[in-house]
């Protein structure tokens, strides 16, 4: 005679199911917490890569066109864009924040030469740091506008000084930080070598 199987032999008890659900929920919660806690670090790395790519794009455009191109940074709100030095005076001709806001791209070299300002390039609009990030300094400047220009040899120089960007830091670096609202402040430094126009992203580190 075959004995009947008890419910214990044929399935799980309600308590066992609840324990499994609780464990799975705990693991999912820990995974979500870990991911959310890493978002500021992910964002600042992405911002550093975007800035580095923008600098290199300006450099390549300068070499390809023979016209100086640069990147101007608004340290007050974390925006930046590539511009063309239309009159080749080795200066950024929109030195106020209002001009930064009103800067518009042009479609032809003729329009560029006729412009009374240095326009941004149309295919690379105004870029913005993530909401949790901010510029600490750009080549030693801590507020307002600062910019870097690349000449037709790809060499980088700062502002109207017409001097190659050189060390020591912060005179040759761009520093961005997280705002610290996540409980910690992280920092990434991008170094620019003037005579070669090379850029290098440093390792992200936590600010004490």
Image (cartoon, rainbow, N blue to C red):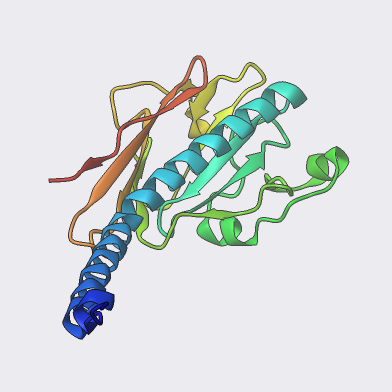
- Along the line of sight, the residue nearer the viewer: 27 or 61: 27
User: Above or below — where is 126 with respect to 138?
Assistant: below
In the visual, does 31 lie left or right of 44?
left
Q: How many marks do you count on the picture?
A: 0
Residue name at image x 36 percent, y 54 percent: 134
77 vs 112, nearest the viewer:
77
**Residue occupying the point 74% across, 23% down:** 64
Q: Is residue 66 toward the left or the right of residue 168 in the image? A: right
Q: Is residue 94 visible?
A: yes
> Where is residue 136 drawn, in percent x and y?
31, 47
Q: Residue furthest front?
A: 1
Q: Is residue 150 left or right of residue 171?
A: right
**Which of 67/36 is in front?**
36
| Image quadrant containing the N terminus | bottom left
Q: Is residue 162 visible?
A: no
Question: In the rendered image of this protein, does residue 113 appear above or below residue 106?
Answer: above
The picture quadrant where one finds residue 99 is bottom right
Residue 152 placement (x, y as % from top left):
67, 20
- Residue 169 point in image, percent of width and height: 29, 28
Residue 65 drawn at (x, y percent): 76, 26
Which image quadrant for residue 29? bottom left
């Amino acid at each position: 005679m075959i004995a009947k199987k008890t419910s214990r032999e044929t399935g799980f008890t309600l308590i066992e199911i609840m324990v499994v659900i609780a464990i799975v929920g705990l693991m999912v919660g820990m995974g979500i917490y870990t991911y959310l806690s890493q978002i500021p670090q992910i964002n600042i790395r992405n911002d550093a890569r975007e800035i580095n790519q923008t600098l290199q794009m300006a450099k390549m455009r300068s070499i390809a066109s023979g016209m100086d191109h640069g990147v101007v940074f608004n340290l007050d709100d974390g925006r930046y864009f590539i511009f063309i030095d239309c009159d080749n005076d080795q200066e950024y001709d929109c030195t106020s924040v209002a001009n930064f806001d009103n800067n518009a791209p042009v479609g032809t070299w003729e329009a560029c030469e006729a412009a009374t300002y240095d326009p941004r390039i149309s295919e690379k609009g105004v870029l913005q740091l993530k909401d949790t990030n901010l510029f600490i300094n750009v080549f030693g400047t801590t507020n307002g506008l600062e910019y870097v220009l690349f000449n037709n040899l790809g060499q980088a120089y700062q502002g109207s000084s017409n001097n190659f960007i050189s060390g020591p830091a912060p005179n040759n670096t761009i520093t961005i930080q997280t705002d610290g609202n996540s409980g910690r402040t992280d920092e990434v430094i991008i170094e620019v070598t003037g005579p070669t126009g090379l850029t290098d992203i440093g390792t992200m580190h936590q600010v004490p």
